[in-house]
Image (tube, helix red, strand yellow):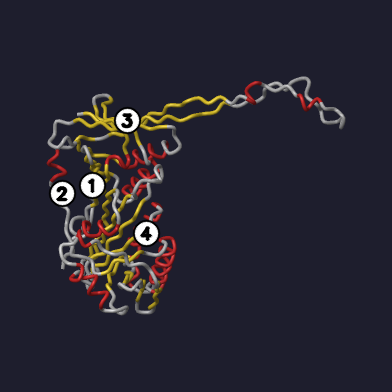
Amino acid sequence: MRFRTELKNIRTFSKLTAALGSLEKIAWLRLSDDTARFTVIPDMGSQVWASLAMDFIFDGYHIQSAEAGNTINLELPLQPLQRALKSALNSISASLRLTKKDGLPVLSMTITTTTSATNPAGAAKPSGTATGDDPFDDDEMFQAEHLETSLRREHEKIITQDIPVRVLHPETVETIMQPRVREPDVHIQLPPLLQLKAISDRFTKLAMASNSGSSAHTKSPKLELSANMHGGLRLRIATETTDICSVWSNLENPELDPAQLDCPVEEHPSTKFRAGGPNHWATVRVDGKDWSRVLSVGRLEGRVIACFADDHALILYVYVPQYDDATADDSVVTYVKHIKMNDELSCFGRWSWVAISRTDFGIELGVRSKVYVCQSTQ
């Protein structure tokens, strides 16, 4: 079993790892000829996937395995990986290799950086240096200099960081089934996440303050998110003493790709919602604190498309640019909110997310709604 590769898109890889690490400390990593798939199983709630094309984060990779499909399955701690990737952010190059240290498997990251040698501190000042007392003294124009002040020397520095892993049997990860959800009713591009997060956090704090005198203060407030097919988005919080909302208009409702749908566009739920007019809203309710953490995905600096399945699920598609290659297509990171619609119990699933590279929205919406989803429980 062998795997070695050069790393690319390190900045994006680091941010993706940070996003996974905010959900769980351990990930299962499946490597194949075409795909790197990260799977996270939180202690509670929905499962998490991230599937990336190998050439999105790896360059010149070589994989060799006796398993079917030439796959390698690893249990991977995310914090050590995140630390190693941070060290590689400003490197000349970085490589990753599956090997053994003291008989135990590790992913060994080798990072090459440069250091510059400047004039040593305390070096003697040349005797011919002008003092600056005589305004006519022009010796300074021809002042002798130490050689290293004009000839900066760069030295390569090699850093190796070992990430402990555990090799998993293929059946361990193959038993994880990806849930399904119905077609979305509304799809809309969200406003800037920093703005949306600031308002959401303020609503949550107001709701918690209004409930501070009752037993309800122990529960996280539920935000009501609504969208329509006419560019409208609404964020609302309602308690016994507070009922406020914020509304955005003129947002974009991206077009679907008919070739990727199971039904004609005319019969798609979003078409019916569009025909219902601007007062026909798809609505979901989410935990305020969870929603705030999800909006932190704004660190990936991509545009975000939200897909609403009314009273059922909310899916976010985050388009992530390839910083190392401006000409390459964006990657898509997908967050899926699975909702249990039982208001009496206030039972809400946790967020899960999926990522796939090199796609555009029209195609991906059709595929994602059929494959990478979370099933709600009535």
Query: Answer yes or no: do the residues labelled 2 and 4 have beta carbons within 8 Å?
Result: no
According to the image, label 4 marks what residue? 295
According to the image, label 3 marks what residue? 108
Q: Residues within 10 Å of mark 1 (few under 14, many from 20)?
A: many
Residue at the image point whose x is 70% and y is 23% from the top: 145
Tell whether 174 sits left or right of 91. left
Q: Secondary structure at mark 3?
A: strand
Q: Secondary structure at mark 1?
A: strand
Cα separation between marks 2 and 1: 9 Å
Q: Of label 3 and label 2, which has the lower sequence position?
A: 3
Q: Of label 2 and label 1, which has the lower sequence position?
A: 1
Tell whether 105 sits left or right of 136. left
Measured along the vertical axis of the image, is residue 120 above or below residue 315? Answer: above
Residue type at the position of mark 2: Ile
Residue at the image point whose x is 30% and y is 49% from the top: 358
Residue type at the position of mark 1: Thr
Query: Answer yes or no: do the residues labelled 2 and 1 have beta carbons within 8 Å?
Result: yes
According to the image, label 2 marks what residue? 176
Query: Answer yes or no: do the residues labelled 3 and 1 have beta carbons within 8 Å?
Result: no
Quadrant location, the C terminus = bottom left
Cα separation between marks 2 and 4: 26 Å
Measured along the vertical axis of the image, is residue 176 above or below residue 336? Answer: above
